[in-house]
Image: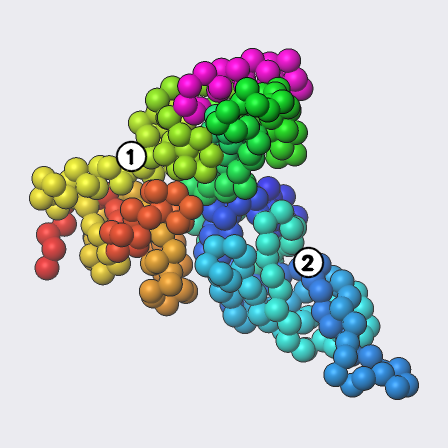
Amino acid sequence: MRTKIIDENSISCVPEDSDDLIALRRVIKKGDKIVGETVRVIKQEKDFARPDKGERIKIRLSIEVEKISLDNVLDRIRVGGIIKESNNESVPHGSHHSFIIKIDEPFNLFKKKWTSVEKKLVRTKDNNLTFILIAIDTSDCGVGKLKGTHLHIMPNIYSGSSGKRYKTNFKIENFFEEVSKALLAIVKTDYQLIVFGPGETKKKFVNFLSKTQIGQNYEIKIIEGVDSSGEDGIHIFTKSSSMKEIISNSKLAKVSDIIDQVMFLANKKSHKFTMGLEETKRANEYGAIDSLIFSEKAIQSNDEQEIMNFLNDVESKGGSVYSVDATTDAGLRVTGLGGIISILRFAVESS
């Protein structure tokens, strides 16, 4: 998340991924003020205009937060409140409006008082790199962007080659050129490219990239042992031991390691872990939580605001909190374990 302090009460925010939206959902409370650009329908008052028809215009306004919720779980945040200020005289002050917080769209947040946890959530710099995962073979190529614990997979790119290539004019260089153009559209500064797939195609592709703008400006690593291409290859890589080794400093690798530790402790019948909300709440009452992971199931199955308050309380007691979603195997595993798990600093007997 990109942030800039305006004054002691206000901060400018630009969320960059779903993890940032979760952090903002934990920060924004009833009574706060949101300032930003939004779209509002203005009723027409011209002669002969249909009374039910309005014009959608972009305005900048300030609203006092009354309600806040994650919309479609992790894609955006919907903030409902009372309009306090606007730059359009057609928008009456005191009326209600829903403001949508989206990735890459800036807004300002004003709070009368910031807690230490809230300051940490918005000011902590995300040191996790963004990885572009490329699972390539002669027939197709899958491309995924991994940032934090969220994986976004693009549609497969197909080469058009057939099983009997001696009957075609297929040229692998043309396929590589198509893939490299797709990569140019998504790579940014400091991204790392990881290439894998069956056979020797991945090495040929990296050699091709080495002569292009991408090869000259970005770090590229080749991974062995993932013998699938396309979307399947992307998913297989995120479950593999290779993933933990090559991106060991990523948030996903850290989360995967915590999940593995929980399963190890469960097999040992240890009391230094929890599964499920009630068991985890009980451990938090003792301040025992070291690391906690939750998925969207924890939000969907319980009162959303209570979950946010609980996560903030865990962090205020020194625990580390991570969110995961269904885009990765780690998110699916946490959902299957009740939507929330934790590793404890010390054992807490279950009642």
Query: Which residue bears the numbered disc 1?
Result: 257
Query: Which residue bears the numbered disc 2?
Result: 36
Closest to the observer: 88 or 117? 88
Closest to the observer: 283 or 132? 132
* Quadrant that contains the N terminus: top right
Return the x and y of residue 155 as percentages of the image width and height.
54, 41
Return the x and y of residue 22 as percentages of the image width and height.
47, 52
Residue 83's place in the image compared with 261, above or below, is below
Of circles 2 and 1, the one toward us is 1
Which residues make up the magenta segment? 196-217
| Dot 2: element | strand
The coloring applied to the image is rainbow
**Residue at the spot 60% in from the left edge and 44% down from the top edge:** 3
Closest to the observer: 251 or 281? 251
> Which quadrant of the figure has residue 215?
top right
* Quadrant that contains the C terminus: bottom left
Mark 2 crowd level (few <14, some 14–19, many ≥20, 10 Å Cα): some
Dot placed on the residue nearer the N-terminal end, 2 or 1: 2
Amino acid type of the residue tagged 1 in the rendering:
Asp
Return the x and y of residue 288 as percentages of the image width and height.
22, 47
Q: Are marks 2 and 1 in contact (CB under 8 Å)?
A: no
Return the x and y of residue 284 as percentages of the image width and height.
25, 53
